[in-house]
Image (cartoon, grey):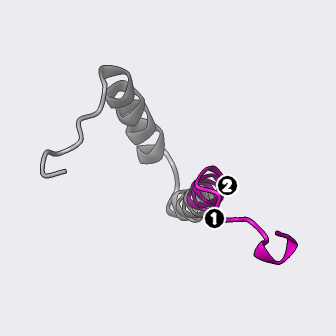
């Protein structure tokens, strides 16, 4: 994982479009968006963790075995 992760052209375009939208926002709007995006990232991370636990069978209730 020493190589930097490259974005696809579609992702680069999306990032540029998002950047343009943020530049048009007020400071308060941008702060609210940042808080909302941070929450979404936390939810996504939790979903990935739960999915991996399930796939790796780490979520088994050993008392029921």
Residue tagged by mark 1?
58
Q: Is residue 50 magenta?
A: yes
| Residue 36 in which image quadrant | bottom right
- Which class describes the residues within 10 Å of circle 1: few (<14), some (14-19), or many (20+)? few
Q: Is residue 37 left or right of residue 15?
A: right
Q: Residue at x 65, y 58 (%)?
A: 57
Magenta part, dominant SS: helix
Residue tagged by mark 2?
54
Residue 3, position in %: x, y? 13, 45
- Tag count in the figure? 2
Q: Give the magenta part as a residue range.
A: 44-65
CB within 8 Å, label 1 to label 2: yes
Q: What secondary structure is marked by label 2?
A: helix
Q: Is residue 56 magenta?
A: yes
Q: Residue at x 50, y 62 (%)?
A: 27
35 shown above or below 62: above
Instruction: Looking at the picture, tell me which residue is in the foreground, 64 or 3.
Output: 64
Q: Residue at x 42, y 29 (%)?
A: 14
Residue 26, position in %: x, y? 52, 56
9 shown above or below 32: above
């Amino acid at each position: 994982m020493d190589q930097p992760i490259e974005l696809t052209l579609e992702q680069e375009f999306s990032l540029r479009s998002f950047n343009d939208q943020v530049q048009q926002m007020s400071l308060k709007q941008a702060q609210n968006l940042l808080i909302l995006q941070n929450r979404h990232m936390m939810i996504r991370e939790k979903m990935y963790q739960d999915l991996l636990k399930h796939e790796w069978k780490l979520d088994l209730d050993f008392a029921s075995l």
